Amino acid sequence: MKVTQIFGLIISILAFTYYMSFAQRLDSPDAQGSVALGIGLLSVFFLALISAILLIPTSIILLRKKARERHNFNGLIWNTVLGFNTALAFFYTFIGLWSVGTFIVIWAGR
């Protein structure tokens, strides 16, 4: 469980860092860079998806104190990691629900 939480956090940080490396070029893509930006955004999307797949179930499981004790998820550092990952899991869940809702509204409007 600790390994999954750490990998999820590392992948989230990697996705954010990779996105920030080219985010300023999204406003004015040129003909040469538009393909690279598309591939970059797709990479960030898949990194965030992998992170969400890792973090959402484990963060939900670790919300219970009994589960945290069973997986030896105690201490200031591990509770901080869990708090940060739980916030990320809620963010990923919100974005997923918002995306599905937007798709349904657009699809139903046709």
Image (tube, grey):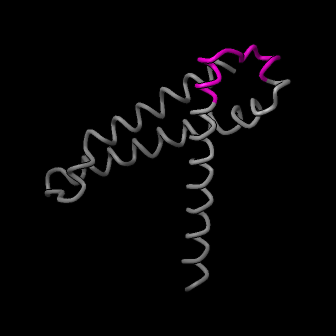
Q: Which residue lies at the image location 69% right of the left edge and 34% below the top edge?
A: 59
Quadrant assignment, res 104: bottom right
Q: Which residue lies at the image location 27% right of the left edge and 48% below the top edge?
A: 23
| Residue 72 among those drawn in magenta | yes
x, y percentage for residue 39? 32, 46
Q: Is residue 103 above or below residue 28?
A: below
Q: Is residue 61 above or below residue 105?
A: above
- Quarter of the image with the N terminus in it: top right
Q: Is residue 93 left or right of residue 20?
A: right
| Residue 44 among those drawn in magenta | no
Query: So how many labels did they put on this image?
Result: 0
Q: 65 or 53, which is in the foreground?
A: 65
Residue at the farthest front position: 76
Q: Which residue lies at the image location 25% right of the left edge and 55% below the top edge?
A: 26
Q: Main secondary structure of the magenta part?
A: helix
Residue at the farthest right position: 66
Q: Which residue lies at the image location 63% right of the left edge and 35% below the top edge?
A: 55
From which residue to which does the magenta span run? 68-82
Quadrant assignment, res 2: top right
x, y percentage for residue 21? 26, 39
Residue at the farthest bottom position: 110
Q: Is residue 16 above or below residue 29?
A: above
x, y percentage for residue 77? 59, 17
Q: 28 or 46, which is in the foreground?
A: 28
- Quarter of the image with the C terminus in it: bottom right
x, y percentage for residue 54? 62, 33
